[in-house]
Image (cartoon, grey):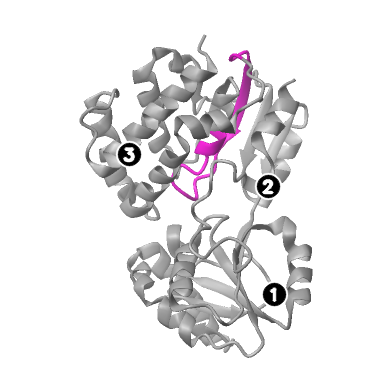
Amino acid sequence: MITRQQLILDFNELGTFIHGVVQGNNANGKISKPLEAALKQTIDQEIYRNGWYDKTHVEQALMGIREWLKTVKLTNFVAEKPYFNFQKKVSLILPGNLPLVGFHDVLCCLLMGCKLQIKMSSDDNRLLPVLVNALKDLNPIYGSFFELDPPKLSNYNAVIGTGSDSALLHFKAFFKHVPHLLRGNRTSIAILRGDETEEDLQMLGKDIFQYYGRGCRSVTHLIVPKGYSFNSFFEALIPYSGVIQNKKYGNNYEYYRAIFLLSQQAFLDNNFLLLKETTDLHPPLGMVYYHHASGSAEVAKYLEEHRPQIQCIVGQGFLPFGASQKPEIDDYADDINTLDWLSKALN
């Protein structure tokens, strides 16, 4: 088989490959030129296959993964974790809301020495096969570790799946006979105190608009103090006005704006983002919810009540503005350590 140390070295090489393709300077990489061309072509064409996957966002997702794939970081990540030497098989059911959003699960399972059966989303089934082929180019043994989109999941020891809340009900029933880690819908919020700088608010714009607000780490709800004025907030977001040019985002924005106008609902609008006052989470795309809080105790109470639905909290004393879409390798979805879960589920 293959040692964990060799896996780490190969992932480091995969990171070098990704960086070179995105930056256009991979002349000395160990992965073949045809695969460089295949990844570049896939990046360029994703927008035509999935209207949410524009080139900039695909490249940002790839470069985020590249930051994980460094020898020291990977070595520390799996230190003292068991290694199953590819005697165990894990089935993955991957989402498709963001480019390569399921890659962290792939990485965790391989570093633990698990074979993989992977059901990819039809919205995101082109990038991962190129990366798998790149690993196979480094060592053909990787071909025996992957089953991509098999007709049926079978002979697995554990399941990791992500889907809508309704899909999770089916997953729980179907996979009740094996250990399963199932993730539903979460979102992220920002807490504003009213003294944020223009730079703070511009960085918050990244948390809101990167990937068009479609990820669990996208800020979709603001907690603001009583009497808060959104003038500075809207002014700081002007550099992101180009999101409205995305047809899918623009259609969502126009649809809900028309609904609000026809139903005479109160809302705020800057011509590319709607704000609605409510304590609810999970607004439709093109919209951010907000509510007022009178003090830290009220904020803390809201966070505690909604903790199961919140992935990230952005603001002073929490994640820095602009950081929600830059997860570290040990930032786990739903705050469940995937490595620890695999250790217990497969032993």
Residue 94 colored in magenta in the image: yes
Whole-percent x, y for residue 54 in the image: 34, 54
Q: Secondary structure at mark 2?
A: helix
**Is residue 119 visible in the rendered structure shown here?**
no
Instruction: Tell me which label, 3 or 1, sits earlier in the chain.
Output: 3
Asked whether the viewer can see residue 211, the reply is yes
Disc 3 marks a residue whose amino acid type is: His
In this rendering, the answer to whether 254 lies above or below 217 is below
Q: Give the distance between the C-alpha atoms of the residues marked 2 and 3, in whole angstroms.
A: 28 Å
Q: Which labelled disc corresponds to residue 335?
A: 2
Query: Residue 292 placed where, x, y %?
Result: 67, 82
Please tell me whether mark 3 or mark 1 is closer to you in this view.
3
CA separation in Å, label 3 and label 1: 41 Å
* Mark 1 surroundings within 10 Å by alpha-carbon count, few (fewer than 14), some (14 through 19), many (20 or more): few
Residue 275 image position (x, y, % from top left): 54, 79
Please state, as top left, top right, bottom left or bottom right, where the C terminus lies in the image.
top right
Q: Amino acid at mark 2?
A: Asp
Q: Residue at x 45, y 17 (%)?
A: 142
Left or right: 175 as drawn, with respect to 123: right
Query: Foreground residue, 286 or 170?
Result: 286
Q: Earlier in the sequence, mark 2 or mark 3?
A: 3
